[in-house]
Image (cartoon, coloured by chain):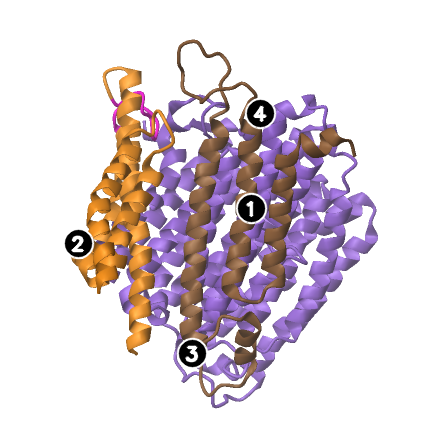
Chain colours: A purple, B brown, C orange
Amino acid sequence: MIRAQLPALLVVVPLLAAPVIVLARRAALAWALALAASWSSFAIAIALFLQVRAAGVVSYAMGSWPPPWGIEYRIDALGAFVLVLVAGMGAVVAPYMRRSAAAEVPGERLYLFYAMYMLCLAGLLGIVATGDAFNLFVFLEIASLSTYVLIALGRDRRSLLAAFQYLIMGTIGATFYVIGVGLLYLMTGTLNIADMAARLPAVTETRPLVAAAAFVTVGISLKLALFPLHFWLPNAYTYAPSAVTAFLAATATKVSVYVLLRYFFTIFGASPAFAEVPFQEALLALSAIAIVTASLVAVYQPDMKRMLAYSSVAQIGYITLGIAMANRAGLTGAIVHLFNHGITKGALFLLLGGVAMRAGRASFDCLAGLGRAMPLTSFGIVIGGLSLIGIPGTAGFVSKWYLVLGAIERGEWWLAVLVVGSSLIAVAYVWRFVEAAYLQPPGPASPRPGEAPLALLVPAWLLVGACVWFGLSTSFNVGGAATAGQLLLGAR
Amino acid sequence: MSAGAVGGHYAYWVTVFLMVAGLYIVVARGNLVKKLIGLSIFQTSVYLLYIGPGKLIGGTAPIVAEGFRVYSNPLPHVLILTAIVVGVATLALGLALVVRIREAYGTIEEDEILDRDREPRGGE
Amino acid sequence: MRSYLVLRVVAKLLIPFMLLFALYVQFHGDFGPGGGFQAGVIGAAAIVFYALIFGLPAAKQLAPEWIVETMVAAGVLLYAGVGVAGILLGGNYLDYFVLDHDPVHGQHRGIFWVEAGVAITVSGVMLKIFYMFAGRRRDADEG
């Protein structure tokens, strides 16, 4: 009986945990509840992944109203894959938060921090689980609003302005998305995503459809931080608390990519009305610019968190490049990179959080001599950096391999050169860390020798290990991505 | 453009005007509270976009009653209630952030805030 | 002062009707514009009106901070609890059909409790927002 209720419980468990935490007040109890809810969601996500692998699609009628009249939770291969990533990151970051959040958030507000974290997790899981376009907007805003609060709880006062700017841009993005959904609802008469795809070919007036596609794409691209709509990301990642940055870097943008994939392939692919819209060319151009310019800008940043934030913009460019290629290999590469980049950036930001705990900041003058002061942390950052570059043996290599394959399949050699060439720029910014940590003597701002506490190191190294594991044993990430990609292309 | 296109669709013209006006205010004004007001205006235009087409000509309120056959669509109203609540929450959160920014920086003009961040400070 | 006297008398006359109107809107959401969110806002507006006329400390005596914060969480728990009750009684989450002896009455009951949860949370949130902003202004003036 529980098995049938899993799609609802996935979202309900963290959603219920949030008000219980608000009533509980005490920080230790709040953390314990958050931990329990995160781990339960992860277990449910794995169970759902296995269910989807066996049955194909899991459909759940919320309130027992049958779709398309009621809200339907619809989890297919792509959704299950992203769910495992999001819930997994939530489960890894939760034990990390106990020491990290206590160091960065004022004590009397800690229970509110955990409540917001639960709402964020529930929102992100809900976005992936739902099969209703407007319900997606509701969960999108739940996740976004709690994200703004989480970012604003950072130590630096610049986190307030970063959260405000993200609020303005994120709300504009979500409202654009709602305008697009409104236009689609006007033309098809339904909000259920699968039903919309079935009704779209029958619609004769194509201009509102193309307008809807434009609005939805721009709205989601704002959330995705696709160049040139990425301006909120560097500030938000740099000034947020370390655990929040790690969690967001691994999940928030990836879930927006999921929404983009869902719309591009399941909905817009269903109707020939969208055939003349130059989605592919525009996305290809923007991705290429994002990869090159963001990587170049990352090389010159004085603060390592900011550098990794710009690196994230570039890596998102790789994902959208794979989507723009729209062939089997390219799409597999994009979805695999969604996962691989999630765990890589998660690992890097968690390790940097340990540095921030010991040194106060993560700017390069604090990182001098880190190789001696915090050897495990530095080595972990180096491995994460190798994964960012795409060295064989790490997860990043697998995604770049498929992207290059996709480019070659399309016969566009310049794309393959772009992917490989930009990895060289990544070498430049990873080298900056290696130089500071291992080749420079400790400076006045460097932390005293001594590792970060175990509560921080263990989750971070778990993710570092995952980077290497999923680079060598690709059955889960590539298998899951390939199944998802095939499903999306088949739906076209 | 025929008179019908302008006159018959005046609801959509108002929607588009509010949408563009709201976006312009967000982009063009540096005062943080004015940005939030522009955002609210922008969100209000979306409510109009949904509710306008929901009303059917000759349709009555969507409550089943004797003698009525044409009902207006209740679904846009439900959607917009949700969107209004989201808008209220966003506005409240934005204003709370503005209050905290004012306490931290002493001003709510965006360029002044960025200037104060650019000046070298003693500590964090 | 005389002008304050007029305000205070009128407020004392109006506030009970505002609260009554909030309850009316809450329960007539089935048949007219209304429902939990609107009722919660009107109820909170009545308390805010009281705070404007009689001062924030008096309002905080009427609706203490800890009650307001508890209301926020309790309303959400009530709503989610109705959903879980649906699961425990054999249906899906937020299934109203199984909540009573027949589906129509089940819908009535489900909607009633869900809207009650919404009203509690919304009035709590609106009051909390008012307390946060109004309370801060006071500190800034004294500081």
The residue drawn where x is 35% and y is 46% is A14
Q: Chain of mark 4?
A: A
Chain part drawn in magenta: C88-99
Can you give x and y, in whole percent of width and height, for residue C99 in the image?
Answer: 26, 23
Q: Which residue is mark 1?
A: A175
Q: Amino acid at mark 3?
A: Gly
Image quadrant containing the N terminus of chain A: top left
The residue drawn where x is 60% and y is 80% is A435
Q: Which residue is mark 3?
A: A360
Q: Chain of mark 1?
A: A
Q: Which residue is mark 2?
A: C62
In the image, taking residue A150 as reference, residue A309 lies left or right, namely right
- Mark 1 to mark 3 CA distance (whole Å): 37 Å
Q: Are marks 1 and 2 on the same chain?
A: no
> In this orientation, which residue lies closer to the viewer: A449 or C103?
C103
Quadrant position of residue A454: bottom left
Q: Amino acid at mark 2?
A: Leu
Between tags 1 and 3, which lies in front? 1
Q: Chain of mark 2?
A: C
Q: Are marks 3 and 2 in contact (CB under 8 Å)?
A: no
Q: Which residue is mark 4?
A: A189
Q: Is residue C91 magenta?
A: yes
Q: Main secondary structure of the magenta part?
A: loop
Can you give x and y, in whole percent of width and height, for residue A135 in the image?
Answer: 48, 37
- Mark 1 to mark 4 CA distance (whole Å): 20 Å
Q: Chain of mark 3?
A: A
